[in-house]
Amino acid sequence: MLSDYTFLKSKKNITLGTIICIPGLAHTKEHFLKTSDGGGWAVNLSDIGFDVYAINWHSLATESNKGIFNSMFVVDALFDFIEHKIKKDVCLLTHSASGVFGWKLAEKSALVKKIIAIAPAPPGNIQDVPEYTVSDNGKTVSVFHLNAVPYTFSREKNWIADMSWIKEKAIGKNNPHFPEEFLNEYQESLVSVPSELMYERMNINGAQIKVNTVKIKEHNPKIYIFTGDQDISHSHDRDKRINDFFVKNGVDSKFFWLADYGFVGNGHMMMLQKNSQEIIDFVISRVN
């Protein structure tokens, strides 16, 4: 079972609900627990009145006794955590690559009542299959999609984010909200990503997790998707397509392009930005 997490109890006399913060590729619970100048979204949510679990799913790699660490290994561990540890209704706060974990968990567990999806990965049902090349006798894969951000990774070792990826993908070139003085500390806080998860996230040969929308509809969760206008891999149309997919299949889903609500210039890592508090306050105002 997932064991690497931090629990923050509601700071209010009543509890508004339980939220599980699930980081994206290369990120950890720490990115929900603190910013460069104070407490992060998990702390903000606890202050508002939620019980909050900030989790580290990357640490599950050390718990796989079969040497298998893929997306469904993570999903199954999170499912077990929800069903046997928390054992009550939850709201998932997913980010980026963990978005697909959220979609699959909504299919598997009736306890998932809401999903707050920040710039989420689409399910394999609708994610484009990318062009790619292989080299070094098939050991190295280079992927060309997700707008202007190419990925090259080894099939034999973990992928590590470099500064180019951080500036272009994670922060965004025209993002005025990310604290520049935090850049080196942010790079050092990132963790490596097993190659199988990279392969699946890129949807090479259709490897990304697919979902059963009939089961999701039966469980009847509410989905809320939020995207910033300076996120190079998450355009308005790309993330709205996820929303439209769920709506078309009878799932209650809403899409929020943050620039339409006065939040201009926000990138992929909005929980680490100078205006992170204002964003999470807006998110909760739309969800509750």
Image: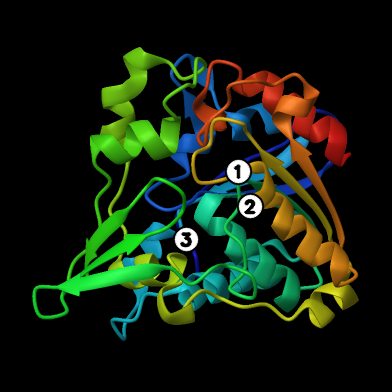
Q: Measured along the vertical axis of the image, is residue 117 above or below residue 288?
A: below
- Residue at the (70%, 19%) spot, across then down: 278
Whichever of labels 1 and 3 marks the residue nearer the N terminus, that label is 3
Residue 242 visible at all: yes
> Residue 228: horizontal and vertical position, in percent?
62, 33
Q: Are marks 2 and 1 in contact (CB under 8 Å)?
A: yes
Q: Amino acid at mark 3?
A: Ser
- Residue at the (64%, 75%) spot, across then down: 125
Q: Measured along the vertical axis of the image, is residue 156 above or below residue 97?
A: below
Residue that mark 3 sits on: 3
Q: CA distance from mark 2 to mark 1?
A: 5 Å
Q: Amino acid at mark 2?
A: Arg
Q: Is residue 174 left or right of residue 277?
A: left
Residue that mark 1 sits on: 235
Residue 112 visible at all: no
Crowding at dot 2, Cα within 10 Å, few <14 / some 14-19 / many 20+, comes out as some
Q: CA distance from mark 3 to mark 2?
A: 34 Å
Whichever of labels 3 and 2 marks the residue nearer the N terminus, that label is 3
Is 266 in front, or is 72? 266
> Residue 168: horizontal and vertical position, in percent?
37, 35
Q: Amino acid at mark 1?
A: Ser
Tag of residue 238: 2
- Quadrant location of residue 173? top left
Task: Report helix, strand or loop for mark 3.
Answer: loop
Is 98 in front, or is 120? 120
Q: Is label 3 or label 2 in front?
A: 2
- Quadrant location of residue 43? top right
- Residue at the (25%, 35%) spot, across then down: 163
Q: Is label 1 or label 3 in front?
A: 1
